[in-house]
Amino acid sequence: MDDDLPDHVPDHLPAPSCGPLAGFTVGVTAARRADELGALLERRGAAVLHAPALRIVPLADDAELLAATEQLIGRAPDVVVATTAIGFRGWVEAAEGWGLGGALLERLGSVELLARGPKVKGAVRAAGLTERWSPASESMAEVLDRLLEEGVEGRRIAVQLHGEPLPGFVEALRAAGAEVVGVPVYRWLPPRDIGPVDRLLDAAVARGVDAVTFTSAPAAASLLARAEERGVLGELLGAFGHGLVAACVGPVTAVPLQAYGVETVQPVRFRLGPLVQVLCQELPGRARRLPVAGRLLEIRGHAVLVDGELRAVPPAGMALLRTLARRPGWVVSRGELLRALPGAGRDEHAVETAMARLRAVLGAPKLVQTVVKRGYRLALDAATDAKYGGG
């Protein structure tokens, strides 16, 4: 929230007549469960821009997975680490398709089986197995700590891979003397249609989205890689550094973003519901609130709340409003407002046209005052006008 807010903005704001995310646009990069995440966001009022940054390719017919499965059945590992529910289920189903299902389950039932989190635990138990241990944090770092504390020198450890190398996990085990067998249950590949990803990148760079959600590290890495391919990585990172929220479901997902210095927000519980709740707190908390002409004006991503009532504002109107709000109460010239209009030329009449539409949408024309021969100003309430130096 801006530092120069009026001192007397009320602590208890009028209850909005809309969802907590109304007026905000959220990008969704998930390939799996994207519909579920999108529905959760839309139910709370958000506009959703869906751009799956990758696709999952099962390896049921993959020779590499078959070879790893036969190797583990033929020679028992000491420990098996199951990292994702979908991956574990896919592994068992693939083994059944090869006629190896019974042998694989028998082998997994005879070794120390570790499950990363409740979902994986559920998949393990659905297969008729029981995990030896599962971390409370759902963190691979905690799994690694446990293994290293137990000692892994000379032990054979099978690790279900995420679809990309687990950062530091396999290397740390091998450095401590373990023999590590990777189990590649699926792979991440770029989406078949890259168009939605490019549209999300364009919107992010143009500040047309307020947050981007990430539910896997490969999705974050894929979006960054595509931005670099298009030559807009610097602009994307700049957007993340100036108001665009990167919302990650957990710390593992955040690693590719944090490697570029992007600050992320994360829920305490690594689930879709808590992820949405974080955005319900984060985005409204960043909205600009100003007492204007006896009304409380809250400026959101693509809309405005006037005394808690949502008003959708077109892009030109939002550009004008944000420019006026940067110096509330001060007169802003038509020339400066013209420069703020997207795609505007040199005709200041465009400012008058966009301003007329903005006033009509707000339903309260007195919120923006015309200062003859000078420009326009937000009509800050008298009690705060002095703080900003008047007009």
Image: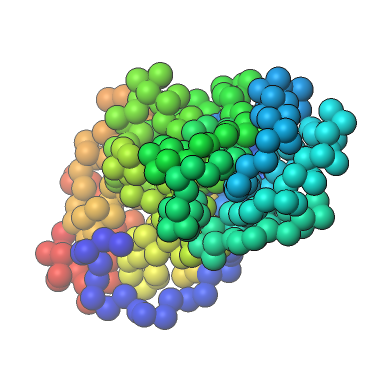
Residue 341: % across, % down? 34, 35
Q: Which residue is rendered at x = 48% and y = 30% of the image?
A: 222
Q: Quadrant of the N terminus?
A: bottom left
Q: Is residue 86 placed above or below 118 in the rendered structure?
A: above
Left or right: 287 as drawn, with respect to 146: left
Residue 227: % across, % down? 41, 26
Residue 289: % across, % down? 35, 65
Residue at the far front in the pictured view: 154
Q: Nearer the viewer, residue 91 or 233?
A: 91
Q: Which residue is rendered at x = 28% and y = 71% of the image?
A: 381
Q: Which residue is rendered at x = 75% and y = 52% of the image?
A: 109
Residue 287: % across, % down? 38, 60
Q: Is residue 386 placed above or below 120 in the rendered structure?
A: below
Q: Nearer the viewer, residue 301 or 356?
A: 301
- Whether residue 53 is visible: yes
Left or right: 112 as drawn, with respect to 280: right
- Whether residue 354 is visible: no
**How many labels sit on residues?**
0
Q: Which residue is rendered at x = 21% and y = 64% of the image?
A: 4
Quarter-wise, where is residue 182 in the image?
top right
Q: Nearer the viewer, residue 216 or 179?
A: 179
The type of colouring in the image is rainbow
Left or right: 156 as drawn, with respect to 99: left
